[in-house]
Amino acid sequence: MTKTPVVAATAVAPMLWGTTYVVTTEFLPPGRPLLVGAVRALPAGIVLCAVVAALAGRLALPRGAWWWRSAVLGALNIGLFFPLLFLSAYRLPGGIAAMIGAISPFVVAGYAYLLLGERPTRRLLAAAAVGAAGVALLVLRSAIALDPIGLAAAGGAALTMGLGTVLGRKWGLPQGYRNRGTALLALTGWQLAAGGAAILAVTFPLEGAPPALTWTNAAALGYLSLVVTALAYLLWFRGVTTLAPTQNTLLTLLSPLVATVLGWAVLGQALSPGQLVGIAAVIGAVLLGTSAPHEAGPAER
């Protein structure tokens, strides 16, 4: 059966992530990737955990195996992923970083086969290949500088989030809540809080004291924390625990698409004919891959 409403809701997450580049470059102080990552994740996690506390009392905190599971997922999806992603963005042209990120569906397919025994269909692999080609048309330019550290960081980001996606699918949602929505809030809050705390622990030793922030900076950070992180990851983890991993990860191709369109609409960047073909290819790949049949996962069995 298809999961059209879940796919549509999950697709909002990478689309929101696609706004990060414009917000970061236009409204935040430069050179503070760890601070931005910590401020994005930790307050969002605390807010979601507070909501769970209001709804479910003592179940706001993990129990049993979920202490270490949420720590592992928080490290993979947030604590490691955010710094690696920002490091690759600083050391590589945006096109190269996005192109390496576009291999994520293949990475997730490999993890899903090893950990879940799920063999990707030809349809999903074809969609992933078309999507990667579309991202290449969107972002690659003739002048390419290859920095080994940046390449390693971009590859590491794809590997960590891919593993976090598959483990999230394997473990599903925590039990004991009255409804799925509250369990999803808890799972998302735990990961954001754990990952944000890990980033914060290294932020000041590596980046020093935070700079003075303007009201514009504060508003941009609030948007990144509450909308691009809390809301987006809530929608994302709903997809992680519902959709097939490779199917879910195909939606991340929408992030560079949105970033490209915003660059044209907000920053006045030109769109070439090749980029227009890339936009069509990414949309076609997402529609092809996410319309595939779906097997029930751990959270639904």
Image (cartoon, helix red, strand yellow):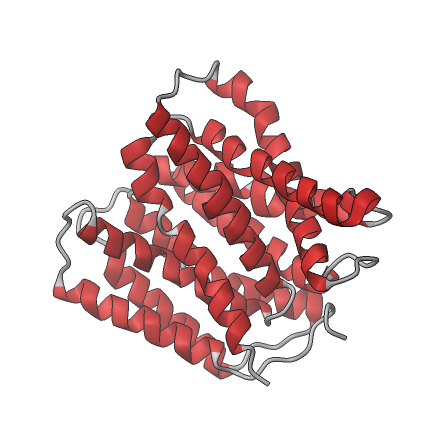
Q: Residue 166: give x, y in percent of width and height.
A: 63, 61
- Please identify the quadrant where the N terminus is shown: bottom right
Residue drawn 39% across the image and 15% down it = 212
In which quadrant of the rendered view does residue 78 lie?
A: top right
Q: Quadrant of the C terminus?
A: bottom right
From the viewer's perspective, is residue 243 above or below residue 204?
A: below
Q: Residue at x 48, y 29 (%)?
A: 34
Please tell me how many numbered marks the rendered image carries. Answer: 0
The answer to whether 5 is drawn above or below residue 78 in the figure is below
> Which residue is depicted at the point 79% across and 57% down?
177
What x and y, as percent, mark residue 282?
Answer: 33, 69
Side (left or right) of 10 relative to 265: right
Relative horizontal placement of residue 118, taking residue 54 as reference (left or right): left
Residue 91 visible in the displayed image = no
Instruction: State the residue lying farthest toward the right.
Output: 64
Residue 5 left/right relative to 48: left
Which residue is rendered at x = 72% and y = 56% of the image?
A: 183
- Relative height, residue 240 to residue 194 (above, below): below
Where residue 33 appears, x then y in whole percent?
Answer: 43, 31
Asked whether the viewer can see residue 198, the reply is yes
> Which quadrant of the figure has residue 193?
top right
Residue sitting nearer the eye, 177 or 209: 177
- Camera-nearest residue between 18 and 128: 18
Which x, y percent locates residue 19? 35, 48
Viewer-side residue, 7 vs 288: 7
State left or right for residue 36 relative to residue 190.
left
